[in-house]
Image (cartoon, helix red, strand yellow):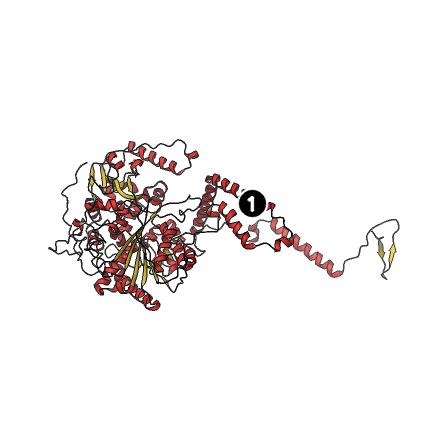
């Protein structure tokens, strides 16, 4: 309701104005008037400044901030992450739709029953409601959307298992972190690593940024000295310590953004009742040869002290769990301890779980050291990423500097790995197709890089590989014809292939093979009496297991995943390759290398893809390497290599992955080389061993049939001790074959 307007008099009374219905207006105070004028002037000044050019104020126009390399890398990572996420949703839309239908099917009845009074709500049995949720809702979701996971440790604890033996973890090749303890500024590089003290240059996101943005300097720091196999001058990398160095790969300061390595197994131990006082990870620099591990870092001495300490503190013998190359490391350690203190293992080690160990080496080490290639680098996407990030010649130089690569060369000769026409692993389908695993390398010599016709065929093969990565509706009609540009004209068995590798590596490389390897092709390398383990890598076919009758060895490995077994090569004898052979690796184009896998070789029915013939294994190590010594009567079940009766048991795990949408690592039944560490069945087995249970054999593969076709006696026979080998010599070993036979 309005009041009549009044005019204020001097005495404060009002004169009423008739006929108008208006509000009363009170004059502002003197202070309020001044404040209003001040605000008005400020607004006018600000408006004037905005209207004037910045140059009149003496201020330079603002420039966009420069984008640092780390920001570029981060933006790229975000783009890739978003693309993969949306691509996965788009690709798996049918599975999402199915999950949604299941979800709604179970939710609708619950929604109808959800209208409850306050009295009914307080009387609900929450345990029953929680069980209903887990049974009806969680089971309808893909596992990637569910918080539930398989926990073998909890199940075993509920079944009455308890911690008994302390556990020591020995990680494998490339799966544990390396820290920078001494770096330098590299010549010609945009930035050095000198100011990155204790940054993890391997197994973290920092590694990825350096690989992309500071490649030359990163490679220089990751390489070892080609003469000594130790630290290059001015550079010092050391293994990160503790469980945090082995549980996840590709970590960052923000948390675990990568994927688990030992994490699931450590979690299982924790669920069973273990804590950090009963679990230790003895990490090491996985680039080093086993002798250099003791020479530089006293690793064997430290491992001995750790085992004895755990035994003393807990009053129980230790269980060792080693993965991949860690198996070679621990068996060499046992041989070293047997030299130092006979019977030491029997006193301190209860059981040894060898998880995916390459006991007899891996064929892919030949291709990696010869041409810097493997199935991971010749595959469609990985090839482009590999050649872009690390040129082929640079990869070869890097791998040849690592003594561990030499230690993983195939052990044993043609009696184990096969000859030019036969292999114990050959299948009837391969025999019908005239193909064998026996020829480790088959190659054709070419005088030019690639003819126009071969180049066109190569591009066609790459397009077909790209199509194979796409869903069926996007790829259209795929062609799976056998693409082959030329027939191999030379076949080489394992010994001949290794001779070619030694020749390509040069005298210094041969010297390292003799000390750090155990190959049959070099009489000095395969010897069992080389001398002290402080200087040499030992041959499992020549050196017996330790005097430890109360110790058990469990051979635990995956099967059912294709693994590299033999190769089809092109021998590139070009003037361009010869001219660039001595150049800096960064300047050599990938098509100018002397040896290159012939990616056009393809026969999927027998496992020949991209010039690589695959056999059964865990995706990295073939079955004949992981399983033969544990099953062959002349191997670790024989008196010559197991004179004291160490108990041997084999446990196989079939690779049964779930869909990538449910679990991109394959799920709890995956058993490829690294994923087996998250395999629920394997975790349950190693927890039972740690709890004191004795396990027997569990065999699914045809390893017994393969073993029956092999006579190990020729490889086990003691070598001729005259003349004695001088592993410090660089003289070439006498060739076993005068020439390679044509196919």
Where 644 falls versus 560 (above or below)?
below
Where 186 falls versus 429 (above or below)?
below
Q: Nearer the viewer, residue 341 or 134?
A: 134
**Residue 672 seen:** yes
The number of discs equals 1
Quarter-of-image position of residue 708 = top left
Q: Nearer the viewer, residue 155 or 326?
A: 155
Query: Where residue 111 sits: x, y (%)?
Result: 59, 46
The residue tagged with tag 1: helix, strand or loop?
Answer: helix
State the residue lying farthest toward the right: 18
Q: Quadrant of the C terminus?
A: top left
Q: Nearer the viewer, residue 52 or 95?
A: 95
Where 108 falls versus 262 (above or below)?
above
Query: Where residue 122 sits: x, y (%)?
Result: 61, 56
Query: Where residue 184 sits: x, y (%)?
Result: 33, 58
Query: Where residue 461 sits: x, y (%)?
Result: 33, 35
**Residue 232 seen:** no
Q: Determine which residue is flagged by label 1.
A: 107
Does 582 sit left or right of 26 as displayed? left
| Residue at x 19% of width, y 40% of height | 420
| Residue at x 44% of width, y 56% of height | 255
Quarter-of-image position of residue 472 = top left
Q: Residues within 10 Å of mark 1 (few under 14, many from 20)?
A: some
Quarter-of-image position of residue 571 = top left
């Amino acid at each position: 309701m309005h009041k009549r307007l009044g005019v204020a008099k001097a005495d404060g009374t009002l004169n009423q104005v008739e006929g108008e219905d208006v509000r009363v207006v009170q004059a502002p105070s003197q202070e309020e008037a001044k404040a209003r004028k001040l605000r008005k002037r400020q607004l006018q000044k600000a408006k004037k400044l905005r209207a004037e050019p910045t140059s009149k104020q003496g201020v330079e126009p603002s420039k966009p901030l420069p984008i640092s390399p780390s920001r570029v890398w981060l933006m790229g990572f975000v783009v890739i992450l978003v693309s993969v996420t949306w691509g996965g949703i788009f690709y798996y839309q049918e599975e999402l739709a199915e999950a949604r239908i299941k979800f709604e099917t179970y939710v609708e009845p619950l929604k109808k029953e959800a209208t409850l009074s306050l009295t009914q709500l307080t009387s609900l049995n929450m345990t029953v409601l929680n069980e209903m949720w887990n049974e009806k809702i969680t089971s309808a979701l893909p596992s990637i959307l569910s918080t539930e996971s398989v926990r073998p440790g909890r199940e075993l604890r509920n079944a009455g298992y308890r911690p008994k033996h302390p556990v020591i973890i020995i990680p494998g090749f490339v799966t544990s972190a390396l820290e920078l303890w001494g770096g330098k500024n590299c010549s010609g590089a945009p930035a050095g690593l000198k100011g990155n003290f204790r940054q993890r240059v391997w197994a973290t996101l920092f590694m990825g940024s350096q690989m992309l943005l500071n490649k030359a300097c990163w490679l220089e720091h990751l390489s070892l000295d080609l003469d000594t196999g130790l630290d290059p001058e001015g550079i010092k990398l050391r293994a990160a310590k503790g469980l945090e160095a082995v549980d996840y790969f590709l970590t960052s300061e923000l948390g675990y953004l990568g994927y688990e390595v030992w994490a699931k197994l450590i979690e299982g131990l924790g669920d069973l009742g273990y804590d950090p006082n009963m679990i230790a990870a003895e990490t090491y620099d996985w680039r080093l040869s086993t002798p250099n591990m003791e020479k530089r870092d006293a690793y064997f001495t430290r491992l001995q002290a750790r085992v004895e300490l755990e035994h003393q503190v807990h009053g129980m013998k230790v269980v060792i769990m080693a993965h991949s190359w860690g198996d070679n490391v621990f068996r060499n350690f046992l041989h070293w301890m047997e030299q130092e203190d006979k019977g030491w293992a029997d006193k301190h080690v209860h059981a040894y779980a060898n998880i995916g160990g390459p006991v007899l080496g891996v064929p892919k080490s030949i291709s990696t050291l010869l041409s810097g290639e493997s199935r991971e680098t010749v595959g469609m996407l990985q090839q482009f990423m590999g050649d872009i990030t690390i040129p082929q010649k640079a990869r070869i130089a890097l791998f040849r500097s690592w003594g561990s690569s030499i230690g993983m060369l195939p052990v044993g000769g043609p009696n184990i790995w096969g000859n030019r026409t036969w292999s114990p692993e050959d299948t009837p389908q391969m025999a019908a197709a005239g193909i064998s695993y026996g020829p480790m390398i088959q190659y054709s010599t070419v005088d030019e890089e690639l003819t126009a016709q071969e180049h066109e065929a190569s591009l066609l093969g790459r397009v077909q590989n790209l199509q194979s990565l796409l869903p069926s509706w996007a790829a259209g009609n795929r062609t799976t014809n056998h693409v082959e540009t030329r027939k191999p004209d030379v076949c080489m068995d394992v010994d001949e292939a290794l001779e070619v590798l030694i020749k390509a590596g040069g005298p210094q490389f041969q010297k390292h093979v003799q000390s750090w390897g155990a190959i049959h092709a070099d009489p000095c390398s395969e010897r069992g009496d080389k001398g002290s383990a402080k200087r040499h890598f030992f041959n499992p076919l020549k050196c017996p297991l330790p005097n430890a009758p109360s110790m058990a060895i469990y051979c635990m490995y995956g099967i059912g995943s294709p693994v590299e077994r033999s190769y089809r090569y092109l021998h590139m004898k070009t003037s361009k390759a010869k001219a660039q052979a001595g150049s800096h690796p960064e300047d050599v184009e990938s098509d100018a290398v002397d040896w290159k896998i012939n990616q056009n070789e393809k026969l999927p029915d027998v496992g020949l893809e991209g010039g690589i013939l695959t056999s059964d294994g865990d995706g990295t190590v073939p079955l004949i390497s992981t399983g033969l010594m544990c099953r062959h009567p002349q191997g670790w079940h024989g008196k010559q290599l197991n004179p004291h009766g160490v108990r041997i048991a084999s446990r196989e795990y079939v690779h049964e992955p779930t869909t990538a949408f449910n679990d991109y690592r394959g799920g709890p039944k995956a058993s490829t080389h690294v994923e087996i560490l998250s395999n629920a069945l394997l975790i349950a087995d190693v927890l039972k061993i740690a709890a004191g249970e004795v396990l027997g054999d569990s065999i699914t593969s045809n390893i017994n049939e393969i073993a029956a076709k092999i006579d190990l006696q020729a490889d086990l026979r003691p070598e001729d001790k005259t003349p004695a080998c001088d592993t410090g010599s660089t003289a070439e070993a006498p060739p076993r074959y005068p020439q390679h036979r044509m196919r």
